[in-house]
Image (cartoon, grey):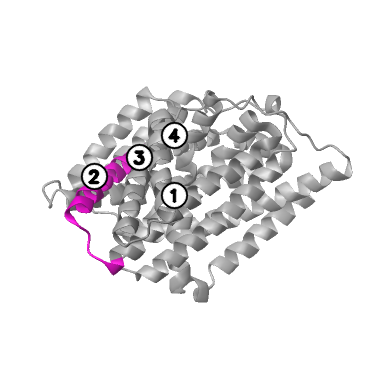
Amino acid sequence: MITDIIIVLATVLVGALLFLPKLVKNKFWRATITPLASIIGSGFLILGPILTQNFGGFAPVAMAALCLVGFLFGMVIRFNIKMHAAQPTGKYLAHVETLSSWVLAFAYIVSVAYYLNLFGAFGVRLSDMPDATNAKILTSGILIFILLVGWLRGFHALERLEQISVSLKLAIIIGLLVGLMLFNAEHIVHNELIFSPSKDLSWPLITLSFGLIVTIQGFETSRYLGDEYDSITRINSMRFAQYISSAIYIIYIGLIAYIFKPEDFGLSETAIIDMMVVVAPILPAMLIVAALSAQFSAAIADTGGSGGLMSELTGGKIKPQYAYLILVVIGLYLTWNVNIFGIISYASRAFAFYYGLQAIIAAVFAYKSGDRSLRFYLYIGLACLGFVIAIFGTPVEA
């Protein structure tokens, strides 16, 4: 009971701070919120169980590695923002840029299916029938609802939801971390911390990690905020968002890795609920609230992003409404034919391909500007890494 009270107080306090008018109106914070919301949109729901099951006591190391890969790809995007602002894009780079935009539009489509399948899985946990079929039915209903809203009215009426959702989600995550800290402290006092062995470090385990890249993506959204913020603001706010998200993720995994044995819980998309009920009775309800608001707002944002990109890339030949229809048809197919871990893997591979293309652009920019130093070779290496992840990423086996 005391733990629940402390968690609620921490959540309310952080929420109150995040809703302070001075912070809400701060331009740099607003620029930070967009990539930050995307990066931690769903990863905190699924990474804990997945990494603990597969990496045991080394889960924080695996999380740090994922964050490092994300930060390096973020460095690529930041360099491209800087170079696009400084010099025009040549014909060759324009073609690569167009291809990468199409890849990103497709990645958004898959990520919407991922977000809404998580929404369905967590949503049915509120009912008496939390099975996979009902989760798919709920996901399908939300996909059709999004199509109707986008087709008939557009998403402007729902844009305010993103700001509220992000602040709510961050407040609940801090409450979750406080609860885990208290639970860890209790285990330390009673000398009950656990160091579970990792699965053997092998190619399948590495490719499984490749399939989790989507959980740390989202920083690239800063690149497409040029109408609202200058390049310096976008570069600095993206970097800051990655610092915050990396700190949250590594602390979170560090607090989970040594209090649960892999055999203590089954691996599913909602396994975090079963884990957190042991930590504090109030946490499952809070996580469901965070999951529903975060996944819905993220799906709205990516639906709008995909529709806008398709319309722009085709010179208006594909109207956003028809892009939404394409997105929903693909989303329904994935929902009923691929499990959520498979969808996560597809989304990760699509984003990795996009990052690989962006790394090629960065390498060409560096070469043309006379920078043949470590930076150039780093970008070439990151391009190769992006393509390797896109080819070999595999889904988690539940």
Mark nearest the camera among 3 and 1 is 1
Amino acid type, label 1: Leu
Give whichever of 204, 42 is nearer the camera: 204
Q: Residue shown at 29%/40% (left/top)?
A: 106
Q: Which residue is mark 4?
A: 344
Q: Is residue 368 visible?
A: yes
How far, Cα to Cα, is label 3 from label 4? 14 Å
Please determine whether, in this image, residue 54 is positioned above or below residue 279. Answer: above
Mark closer to the chain start, 1 or 4: 4
Report crowding for label 3: few under 14, some 14 to 19, many 20 or more residues within 10 A (C-alpha): many
**Quadrant location of the C terminus?**
top right
Q: Is residue 352 left or right of residue 152?
A: right
- What x and y, as percent, mark residue 78? 40, 60
**Relative height, residue 171 to residue 118 (above, below):** below
- Of all residues, the one furthest to the right in this rendering is 190
Helix, strand or loop at label 1? It is helix
Q: Magenta residues, as a range?
A: 85-113
Q: In the image, what residue occupies the spot 55% across and 58% down? A: 243
Q: Nearer the viewer, mark 3 or mark 4?
A: 3
Instruction: Tell me which label, 3 or 1, sits earlier in the chain.
Output: 3
Write down the residue under mark 2.
Answer: 99
Q: Secondary structure at mark 3?
A: helix
- Mark toward the start of the polypeptide (3 vs 4): 4
